[in-house]
Amino acid sequence: MPSKSLIQSSLLLIYIIIACTTFLTSLPSVVAPVYEPACNSTCYQLEWIVGHWRSEFSGKVFWPTVPTMTFGEDLKIMEAPLARSANVQFLNFSARAWSHSTKDHFHDEWGFVTVDPTGNATLMTSGNNGFTTYEVGHVSHNKLVLTLKDIGRISFSRDLPVEDLRRTFIRHDDRFLEQVIEMRTATHPKIGYLEHTRVVYTKQDS
């Protein structure tokens, strides 16, 4: 006949097993990890464009009144802190371009880009050429198309008299991003757009 101590030990072990089983069955089912995008809120729709992109010499400038030029550009689109007062998630946008042949500085742009739950995107930029742009459009799979909604200039700016602009970003794969800018000025063209710049960036590690 089992001893009293052995019976007590067996009962204790059974109690522990029952308690552990009850605890484990009360836990939620184990599921595959949920993917958390780098961008908060609805900005996950722009996650494909987030990062550091650079082109040393693939950029081309085209316009009827200027010679075709080759340029390089450094583009950074990074997550910005969420402004709780507005509750809108923005991405920081910055671009710096230079002449490939002379290394002379072309222009800088700084701004913010965001998107709403339906895919409507907005880009606001300010450049060291003396004007600011407000562009709106739509984001789809690996593509963002924006058109000029409004433009502001400082009184002594000497930029081209831009009347309309269309900016397109296309990510071809994990390594390459392309940007095409088409525009219309007071003199060219009469209707529609002419391609002004085209550049293909390579994704940088940092």
Image (spheres, grey):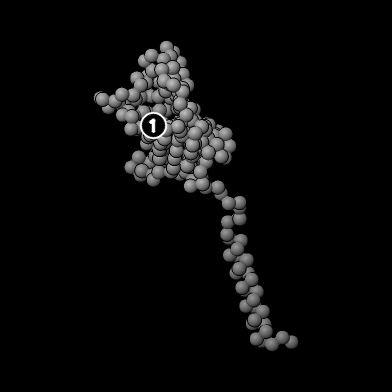
Along the viewing direction, whichever of 101 and 118 lies nearer the viewer: 101
Which quarter of the picture shows residue 160? top left
Residue at the disc numbered 1: 106
The reply to whether residue 175 is visible in this rendering is: yes
Q: Quadrant of the N terminus?
A: bottom right
The residue at the point 45 percent across, 33 percent down is 100
**Horizontal side, residue 86 vs residue 205: left or right:** left
Instruction: Pinpoint residue 21: horizontal percent, then vertical percent.
Output: 63, 66
Label 1 SS: strand
Question: Which amino acid type is shown beneath numbered disc 1?
Answer: Phe
Query: Does residue 150 sit above or below 98 in this rendering?
Result: above
The reply to whether residue 181 is visible in this rendering is: no
**Horizontal side, residue 17 vs residue 88: left or right:** right
Q: Residues within 10 Å of mark 1 (few under 14, many from 20)?
A: some
Query: Does residue 30 sit above or below 138 in this rendering?
Result: below
Instruction: Pinpoint residue 169: horizontal percent, then vertical percent.
Output: 50, 31
The residue at the point 43 percent across, 43 percent down is 79
The residue at the point 64 percent across, 82 percent down is 8
The residue at the point 65 percent across, 74 percent down is 14
Query: Does residue 177 sit above or below 195 in this rendering?
Result: below
Instruction: Pinpoint residue 35: horizontal percent, then vertical percent.
Output: 55, 47
